Image (cartoon, grey):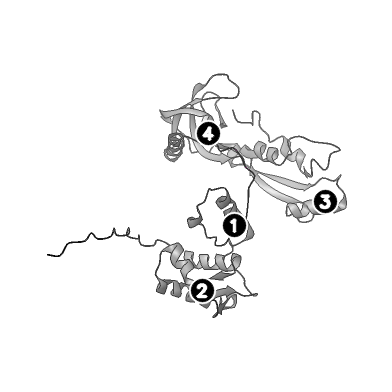
Amino acid sequence: MTRATASPPSAPARLPTRWSQDRRLEFVDFRLRWDGRINRSDLTAFFGISVPQASLDIAKYLDLAPQNVAYDRSSKVYLATDRFKPLYPANEPARYLNELLARTTGVLQPELSFLGWTPPAAAVPSPNRALPVDTLVALLDAIRREAAVSIVYQSMAATEPGERTIAPHALAHDGFRWHVRAYCHSREAFVDFVIARILGIKVAGTPGTDGADDEAWHRLVRLVLAPNPELSEAHKRVIELDYGMTAGEVALDCRQALLFYALKRLGLLEVHPGQPQVQQIVLRNHDEVAHLLPRGTAPS
């Protein structure tokens, strides 16, 4: 009698890829631009496709942009040529650096990133504001269903948490913290609530809002930034380079509801006369913007 041997555990079946060929071509374009090279194994490893399919994808890319690629027989890889021009407009430095930042801070896992080789990188640390999953899920559900919720909230204006009914319609990030934009029934106004300060949440059973009448959320305010005129001409040119200015200025569009946070982050809420090295940029259209800062702009 032959002894039956145990079969090795089978590897989990790989799910069929849901990535379109266009997405895979974008991956090829990305790797060629930022890694300078691509091969079939890059595609098979990232997308879980077969080698023949990877070959077809690369062949398709060669048909679309033959000037972008040259095959190196010695290393058996496709290399970007000095005539490379990206096929995808979104394949810009900002995307690369944002993805590098997301990987560096752990927001994006390496296996989900288009990045291949990456340089050593670091980011300024910031406190990790952990949010209760149930709180965020409840807020998202309320926004989706246009429903109101009752929250227990720790306001900076009170020593003890208080309960209030809000109708959330959007989320916003001020550069450091996440807020929920909502109509507050007690204040009878649209205001911001720091999500981390919500200590409890439940369905209120009252109608919510889609935010259509939140004028400050929908109104865009143009911020015209320029180098501080008190800087030397050489330093002005440096600031113009730092901020990507053209003809000595750059314009940013900001929701009025986020105006306080934008000016605070840019260091423009307070004026520092005679200190151009401290306040290196100025708001050229300050008079047009200042009156748009609503009362009680800071989160409650």
Q: Residue at x 53, y 32 (%)?
A: 196
Q: Which of the pair 120/237 is nearer the observer?
A: 120
How far apart marks 3 and 4 lie (CA) works out to 39 Å
| Residue type pointed to by label 1 | Arg
Q: Is the magenta stretch mostly helix, strand or loop?
A: loop
In the image, residue 182 lies at what x, y percent? 52, 33
How far apart marks 1 and 4 lie (CA) works out to 28 Å
Residue of label 3: 236
Q: What element carries label 4?
A: helix
In the image, residue 241 lies at what x, y percent? 76, 55
Q: What element carries label 2?
A: helix
How far apart marks 2 and 4 lie (CA) works out to 45 Å
**Of label 1 and label 3, which has the lower sequence position?**
1
Q: Which mark is residue 95?
A: 1
Q: Do the residues labelled 3 and 2 touch (CB within 8 Å)?
A: no
Label 3: how many Cα within 10 Å (few below 14, some 14–19, many 20+): some
Residue of label 2: 61
Q: Residue at x 40, y 74 (%)?
A: 52
| Residue 295 appears left or right of 15 | right
Queried whether the magenta region covers residue 155, the answer comes back as no
Residue of label 4: 195
| Residue type pointed to by label 4 | Ile
How far apart marks 1 and 3 lie (CA) works out to 27 Å
Magenta residues, as a range? 124-130
Q: Is residue 172 above or below residue 185?
A: below
